Image (spheres, grey):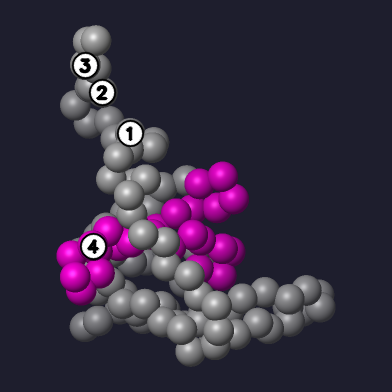
Amino acid sequence: MAEFNLDTGFVPVVSEENVQAGEVVFEKPGDSFTGVYDRSAPGQFGDVYFFIDQNSDRRIVFGSTVLATKLKGVQPGQTVQIKYVGTQKSGTGRDYKNFLVGIKQ
């Protein structure tokens, strides 16, 4: 079977490295993750954020409106900490997961 590759400058939408990345799950208030930001990509329900953790493992964080807003200015190579602070109510009364996001200086 012939082997095919994308042209230079194109990144696969789903690649072997993306599939093998471990998902970061925030279940309870206080759960946190620290990693070096690599990139983001559009996902089915929002952006997907790719990080490298302290063990050099690839990790992914599935985005939400809150995370998209708070990660907007983060640049590749910056060390980021994401901390889940719990569920809160929006101004319209809807529950959402809230996060603190910081970059290492």
The residues tagged by marks 3 and 1 sit, at their Cα atoms, a distance apart of 15 Å
In the rendered image, residue 100, in percent from the top left (x then y), is placed at: 47, 83
- Residue behind mark 2: 6
The residue depicted at 29 percent of the width and 35 percent of the height is 11
Residue 25 to residue 10: above or below: below
Circle 3 packing at 10 Å, graded few (<14), some (14-19), many (20+), is few
Against 42, is 95 above or below? below
Judge from the rendering whether residue 102 lies leftward or rightward of residue 52; answer left or right. Answer: right
Disc 2 vs disc 4: Cβ atoms closer than 8 Å?
no
Residue beneath disc 4 = 57
Report the amino acid beneath label 1.
Pro
**Residue linked to disc 1:** 12
Looking at the image, which residue is at 31% across and 77% down?
A: 34
Residue bounds of the magenta highlight: 43-67
Residue 83's label in the rendered image is: none
- Is residue 60 a member of the stretch shown in magenta? yes
Check the image and name the residue furthest to the front. Answer: 1
Where on the picture, by quarter, is residue 95? bottom right
- Inter-mark Cα distance, 3 to 4: 27 Å
Is residue 45 visible to us here? yes
Looking at the rendered structure, the number of numbered marks drawn on it comes to 4
Circle 1 sits in a helix, a strand or a loop, which is it?
loop
In terms of image quadrants, where is residue 3?
A: top left
Residue located beneath label 3 in the image: 3
Where's the N terminus, which quadrant? top left
| Residue lying at the far top of the rendered structure | 1
First in sequence, mark 1 or 4: give its number.
1
Please, is residue 57 above or below residue 33 in the view? above
The residue at the far right in this view is 93
Residue 86 sits inside the magenta stretch: no
